[in-house]
Image (tube, rainbow, N blue to C red):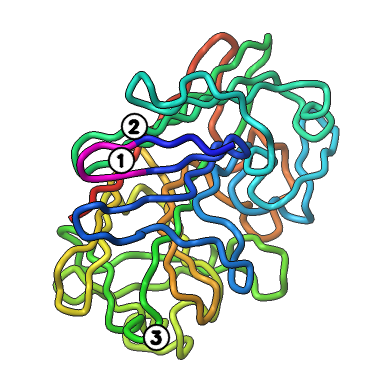
Amino acid sequence: MKRILENERLCIEVEDKGAELVRLYDKEKKAELLWNGDPAYWGRHAPVLFPNVGRHFRDHFQVQGEFFPSHQHGFARDSEFSCLEDGGTGRILHELKSDESSKKVYPFDFSLKVSHALEGSRLIITWEVFNPGSQTMFFAIGGHPAFRVPADSYREHKLYFEEKSSLIYYLIDPKGSGTVLAKEPHILALKEGCYALDRLCDGEKVLADALFDRDALVFDNGQIETVSLLAPDGKAILKLAGKGFANFGIWSAPGAPFVCLEPWAGRADDFGYEGEMKDKPGINALPAGECFSREYTIEVF
């Protein structure tokens, strides 16, 4: 079921399945900003990634010596959430709780709450993970919103990173494991903080003719707190902002008219990682009885 929330500037729709944002409409400009989910390119809009972001090496992970199967981006995006608030309170609030089915693939008790709220020209997305169990739980969580970019001017659009002259990024293993080549850093050289949705470069070296021909770009160490999508004339269309995200992904399906700007707390395994989940670099450890929260905003111009 879709839940609707709107104010004078924005209208959003959120599905109970996955607590997924499926519409972001700018009333002032009469513009749909979120990707429409055309399965010819990518059949989603803005899934919530939990309890893993990306993939585990060999599609399984280890907890206290026991192996569990894992799917890319976790199971939350395909799970039915309970709707606790449907917009009448000024927000849409969903919750997903662990059950016997989830424990077959993820052996921890949890509660995941996802909130969508509007404040003027800003959409505020908040996640709260609670550990009701008796042991420390380990997880990653991330956003995956896809924003429309017209195909006929795709490469003329730019991403703007405030006060940055360059960024370090990593690529995904091209052999299909879906994990990160963390021993091979690349430099994303920016011009006045901007990078066009054009060729993929490592400094001056061209790695691919199109930006996402090598899959996603992965950024670690909290490098990205804000990123704006700019139109060909240099004017900002929207800005995504969030603090406390150690990781960030930027992706699109090759040739697709959208770009995903993805704040992550945790990410895919490094290529070849086969250790315990608790020892994975960047994993979130949440003690029993405690709560973890992150928030990011999408501001429309």
Alpha carbon separation for disc pair 2 and 3:
36 Å
Residue linked to disc 3: 199
Residue linked to disc 2: 117
In x, y percent, where is residue 252? 49, 70
User: Which of the two discs, 2 and 3, labels the residue nearer the N terminus?
Assistant: 2
Q: Residue at x 53, y 42 (%)?
A: 20
For the residue carrying disc 2, how many other residues have a C-alpha within 10 Å: few (<14), some (14-19), or many (20+)? some
Q: In this rendering, is residue 22 above or below 244?
A: below
Horizontal side, residue 119 vs residue 136: left or right? left
In x, y percent, where is residue 91? 37, 26
Counting every numbered tag in the picture gives: 3
Residue linked to disc 1: 123
Q: Residue at x 45, y 42 (%)?
A: 13
What segment is highlighted magenta in the picture? 6-11
**Quarter assignment of residue 101:** top right
Which element is circle 2 on? strand
Q: Amino acid at mark 2?
A: Ala
In x, y percent, where is residue 107? 77, 26
Alpha carbon separation for disc pair 2 and 1:
6 Å
Q: In this rendering, is residue 203 above or below 182?
A: below
